[in-house]
Image (cartoon, rainbow, N blue to C red):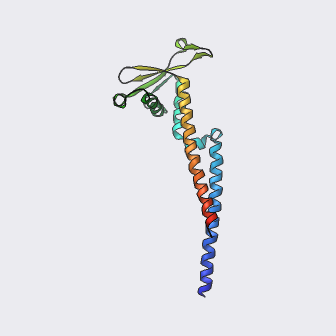
Amino acid sequence: MPKADKLAGSFYTETFMRRYIFISSVILSILGYLLSSADHIPFILKIFSPSFVSANRGIETLLGNQNLKTGDQGFEQLSKIMFDMLKKNNPPEELAKINILNFYKLPSNQLTPSDEGLVPIVNVVLSNQQTIRIKLSFLKEAVFDLKSRNLFYCGLILFCLGLTLQFVDFFKK
């Protein structure tokens, strides 16, 4: 009788492991597909890149209301993006002393002309009473980069997990 128990135990373990690896691989493949189609599936963006969704809502608020202040959805994310831009040219100890109070889009009669027409400009009001002018397109580009980076890292994690499962299955007896 010990022989039958031993056989049943090894059969269960091997079958279980194969099923686990197969089901996990299928789930990872589905998640990979959903990540690659995230632009068309808003639910996936909310899960894998919530900061992008919030920042994008902040951009939409700027386009609609023309004003984004503390507490509005997307304000925190756009502030982080703005501080990342400011870090390139300003010492960190100076940046630590200031906060962003609000963003507001200039009215159309105050826009800057360019080759493509009028370029929307956003004023960023800082707590030290300075105002920074930035093209709305720069903020949009930074928000898009945020989405791309988040989805890339999630995809990389899924890829590594899938690869690990494949190695486990390959080297398993």
**Relative depth, front residue between 79 and 88:** 88
Q: Position of residue 104 (x, y in %)?
A: 48, 21
Q: Position of residue 105 (x, y in %)?
A: 50, 20
Q: Quadrant of residue 18?
A: bottom right
Q: Position of residue 149 (x, y in %)?
A: 55, 39
Is residue 167 at least partly visible in the picture? Answer: yes
Furthest residue toward top: 109
Residue 144 vertical placement versus 66 (above, below): below
**Relative depth, front residue between 167 and 32:** 167
> On the picture, is 37 further left or further right than 157?
right
Residue 14 vertical placement versus 62 (above, below): below
Q: Quadrant of the C terminus?
A: bottom right
Residue 6 vertical placement versus 135 (above, below): below
Q: Identify which residue is drawn at 52% across, 25% down.
A: 62
**Relative depth, front residue between 109 and 136:** 136
Q: Position of residue 89 (x, y in %)?
A: 42, 26
Q: Identify which residue is drawn at 59% across, 77% down.
A: 9
Q: Identify which residue is drawn at 55% across, 34% down.
A: 145
**Relative depth, front residue between 25 and 39:** 25
Furthest residue toward bottom: 1
Is residue 64 at least partly visible in the picture? Answer: no
Q: Identify which residue is drawn at 54% across, 26% down.
A: 138
> On the picture, is 18 further left or further right than 157?
right
Badge count: 0
Furthest residue toward front: 171
Q: Quadrant of residue 114?
A: top right
Q: Quadrant of residue 113?
A: top right
Residue 99 vertical placement versus 44 (above, below): above
Q: Quadrant of the N terminus?
A: bottom right
